[in-house]
Image (cartoon, helix red, strand yellow):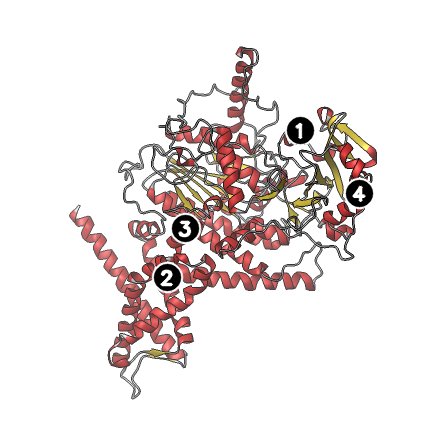
Amino acid sequence: MADGKWRRAGATLIRVIAVWAASALTLLALAGILPDFRLQSDDGDTITRTAFTAAWGAGAFGLLSALVWPVLVRALLIVPALVLGALVFFLNGSLLLIALRLIPDGRGDAAPETAVVVAAVMSAVASATSTAFAVRDDDAYRRRLSRLAYRRRRGRPADQGGPGREGPPGTVFIQLDGVGHDALVAAAAAGLMPTVAGWLADSSGHRLTPWRTDWSSQTGASQLAILHGSNHDVPAFRWYEKETRTVMVSSRPASALEMQRRAIERTRDGGLLTIDGASRGNLFSGGAGQLALVLSMAARRGKGSRSRAGYFAYFSDPANATRTALSFVAEVVREIGQSTRARARKVTPRVKRGGLYPFIRAFATVVERDVVVAAVLGDLFAGRTAVYADLVAYDEVAHHSGPHSRDAEKVLERLDRSLALIAKIADRTPRAYRIVLLSDHGQSPGETFAGKYGLTLKDLVRAGSGLPVPRRAQRTRSASEARDAVRIALHRPVEGGVDEQAAKLSDPIVLASGNLGLISFPDIGGRASREQIDRRHPALLSTLANHPGIGFLLVRSEEHGSVVLGPGGAEVPIAELSDEEGPLAVFGAGAADAVRRTDTFPHVADIMVNSMYDPGTGTVHAFEEQIGSHGGLGGEQSRPFLLWPRGLTDPLDIMAAESAESAESAESAEPGESVSAPVPPGGGLVGAEAVHRVLTRWLQESSGPQVPVRAEGFAGAGPVDEPFPPGVPGAGPTAARTAQAIQPLPPPNRQDPAPDATGTTA
């Protein structure tokens, strides 16, 4: 024991001396290169004296960085996150100027702008040197990365597996936002994602399957259901609620919090992560007690609840902060170069990528990625039971560059490196971890509706309603989660993206969610009927249904109930919808059920509009400024993936067991007694709510029967006996969920399917 301590102390001392020496040599080199930076007196010094000055300055800068920097960052958490990122260079340069002032006899001096450059280079060199030594020392490597944790390990239970990695394993869920099943398979096959390819190639490693989204194929609906078990009454990314005359926007903190509250009220369950969980970079908390960059908690006050609090763990290390800031600048330059090249080559389809977009892209692909990955690494060292993290980089770039573009492929390469780091660290943590990779939706390519037809959906609706249309079509702004995340980081309000507040009550409100459009008539109470719409605007429904850019409409009829309208006068009652024929035939299996389910939502729009879909090219037409889109039916957007370790139960077996249980419950139920809805037969993994049930089962398999869940699943923080928030009927300190004991599934009758040509298994 004592020998081990002395060896660790000796290794630490050697590493400190090496970093000090590298920093001193860097100072000497920069002093010889930069004209406004000196380490000598005005009369000159000997080489020995100059070297001593450099060592003194490097040591002072290192101590200030270690002692003062974390205090500065914590004090500046009141500053918007992006402003803090911009201050990294200034703060680092200021620390260097102070260090130079501490050199005896005033031998160190630098111009302020030069000090910024010198400090950035020194931080990078010190980080590289320290990391190089730490890689050879597992304990040092773990200690360095564990400092990135949002919460200290202090206070954690002592038994988390121990040095021998015994005890129940933890689970890490990594969501690759917007990466469809086919896109993941193609990237792995092309060598863009070697980590994923290795998991797929290893027969004892992971298995891959697609799953089918709901009609609303976007993060708000999918992640809410995955984390909280229900996305009932979430018809789109944004929708209008007549009773309050407000637009709900999934990426608006107040809306996300309300969506989370409604899901908890419906399920009476705090969420997937209520048992010792962490939520990182998500729209919703999942009931986790540990939060970082969680949108629904962004506006809440209190310890650990504010969204930007998660930035501290990363920016508290000046080397990491400097590296991220440099990468941010490089990403901005990269985006400007890529967009300029696309314009010069007249690449089509193409959308505008100027203004603030290069900075928004850099925030999503660099800052958010680095902070989320750092938080996950901290969770691994803290031994948390369940971690769910969302990496949004691909989704943001694919919206503007296209899901199959070279720009998007580069992002997948960088995401794979992040996965490799997480997997490597998971092998070094005190507790064993299972890594589950999944996505919330895919992306379908295609020219925008406005680009193809010269007018927006809003313009088409106004024309069909006999209302004036501007000569120049006004394009609908993009519903980008990253754009809204930047606004939140800057303490700016998230806008609804439409001028619905200024519109007259008699004018229709038109909202867009990818290739899904929602039309509401605010002066008609409740859900407007087809007959009411026809009396007011006789040409509107036929104008929309027969437009070549529109696939089908959903509207309520007083005579026939809800109906789907399509080109050529097609009209099908919703009860008679079929995937094999009619307006939904081209959209594939499950489309009819998805439309029927959405039709039951209280806040379904008066007219639901889905764009056309070309199954030959896989293209749709987004009603927003996106050439890679998601939100409705059609193509890859509805086909995300689930990649899991083979030691966990197959999702199809879980669904089959649930289906059998549902059938038994239906048979034994008393007349009028409600039972859970049966699992759709033969449909595979259908809907985000089904994914939630699978993930919940896996957590139970890993950890066994659980203790009651604390009610803080809603608020994300609080004592175990804290009651549910107001608005959850019948809930209180005793209304916590208790997981039932795990009953082993019967052996499946089928054999594991053989991999297909792409290397995946169904």
Tell me which label, 2 or 4, sits earlier in the chain: 2
- Residue at (46, 49) in percent of width and height: 418
Q: Position of residue 610 (x, y in %)?
A: 71, 39
* Left or right of 166 on screen, residue 434: right
Q: Residues within 10 Å of mark 3 (few under 14, many from 20)?
A: many
Q: Nearer the viewer, mark 2 or mark 4?
A: 4
Q: CA distance from mark 1 to mark 3?
A: 40 Å
Mark toward the start of the polypeptide (4 vs 1): 4
Label 2 near label 3: C-beta < 8 Å? no
Quadrant in the rendering for residue 23: bottom left
Disc 4 marks which amino acid?
His
Left or right side of 657 for 704: left
Spatial CA distance of label 3 from label 4 is: 47 Å
The reply to whether dot 2 and dot 4 touch (C-beta < 8 Å) is no
**CB of mark 1 within 8 Å of CB of mark 2?**
no
Residue 500 position, x and y percent, is 65, 48
Task: Find disc 2 in the rendering and name its residue.
Answer: 318
> Closest to the observer: 148 or 307?
307
Label drawn at residue 310 = 3
Question: Which amino acid, by three-letter code, is at mark 3?
Answer: Gly
- Given residues 582 and 426, the one toward you in this image is 582
Whether residue 214 is visible, yes or no, is yes
Whether the residues at callouts 4 and 1 have beta carbons within 8 Å, the answer is no
> Label 4 belongs to which residue?
547
Q: CA distance from mark 4 to mark 1?
A: 23 Å
